Image (tube, helix red, strand yellow):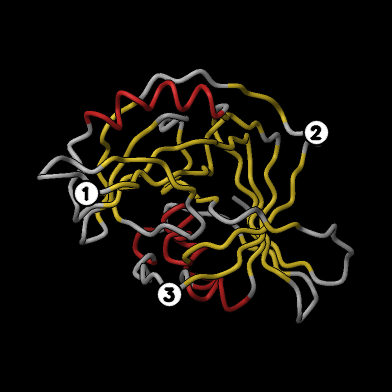
Amino acid sequence: MPISLFGGRKREYAKMLEEGWQLYKNPTTQEPVGTLFRIDEARRRFMVDQVTVDTNEGAEAVAKVQQKIQANIGFFANFLGLDRFSGKLNVEDIETLEFEIINSVRQFSFDTAMDRAMAPVLASLNYRIDNRYYVIRETRSATAMTYRLTQAQLGAIGGEMSLSTALGVNTTIGAGQKGFYEINQTFPERMRVMFLAEEIAPVKAGLAGDKPMLGRIPVRHPLVWSEG
């Protein structure tokens, strides 16, 4: 995973992803569309179910997709496998991270397919009011990623020397005081790297002790958790 610093060369504008896109805790071949999980009051995440849902899949129009995402910098350290630098898991500790997805493929489900698959789940779910429940609605996978970090962001996950030692890579620094650190990561196989979720939450109170009616609400903020 080589690290370099670039400054003067022209780069294409990276577009901000729509609100709600999340990084997985680590790049993974698991947790496809239809994965249900909950986050408890201590921000620990637990898997709940895997719902079978009809999905569609397709490659992005270009081989390299440049994006920006709102994410927790400590959570990003986890994503890189740097658990010892991932202590900053406060909800308020949110950064704009710039990256490039190589050979991006999107997996998603239409509303009608998701409604059909989730109807029996919502009716029978053992909903705990002190937990937050989510279902993965869309994913992006890649064969490689390039992360572009400011000097402050790199420092927050251990700094150049610590990062190089932790990752076991050579570090090359070019000219450019105002450049970005660039981390290139190639995966051993196609991996899911980010997802879009919906929250499962009460949309109507139950009567006379009945369970509340549950529905799905789009998530518009970064999620923060540790694995339970």
Label 3's element?
Answer: loop
Q: Which label sits on residue 61?
A: 2
Q: Residues within 10 Å of mark 3 (few under 14, many from 20)?
A: few
Viewer-side residue, 150 vs 115? 115
**Sooner in the amino-acid sequence: mark 1 or mark 3:** 3
**Sooner in the amino-acid sequence: mark 1 or mark 2:** 2
Q: Which residue is mark 3?
A: 92
The answer for how far apart the CA atoms under marks 1 and 2 are is 37 Å
Q: Is residue 13 above or below residue 202?
A: below
**Sooner in the amino-acid sequence: mark 2 or mark 3:** 2
Quadrant in the picture for residue 180: bottom right
Q: What is the x, y in percent for residue 205?
A: 25, 48
Q: Disc 1 vs disc 3: Cβ atoms closer than 8 Å?
A: no
Residue type, mark 2 in image: Ala
Viewer-side residue, 139 vs 124? 124
- The reply, left or right, for residue 208 in relation to residue 20 is left
Q: Is residue 198 above or below residue 137?
A: below
Residue type, mark 3 in image: Glu
- The reply, left or right, for residue 226 in relation to residue 112 is left
Residue type, mark 1 in image: Gly
| Residue at image location 38% in from the left, 27% down from the top | 118
Label 1's element?
Answer: loop
Q: Which label sits on residue 204?
A: none
Q: Which residue is mark 1?
A: 228
Q: Is residue 46 above or below residue 40?
A: above
Q: What is the x, y in percent for residue 35?
A: 38, 32
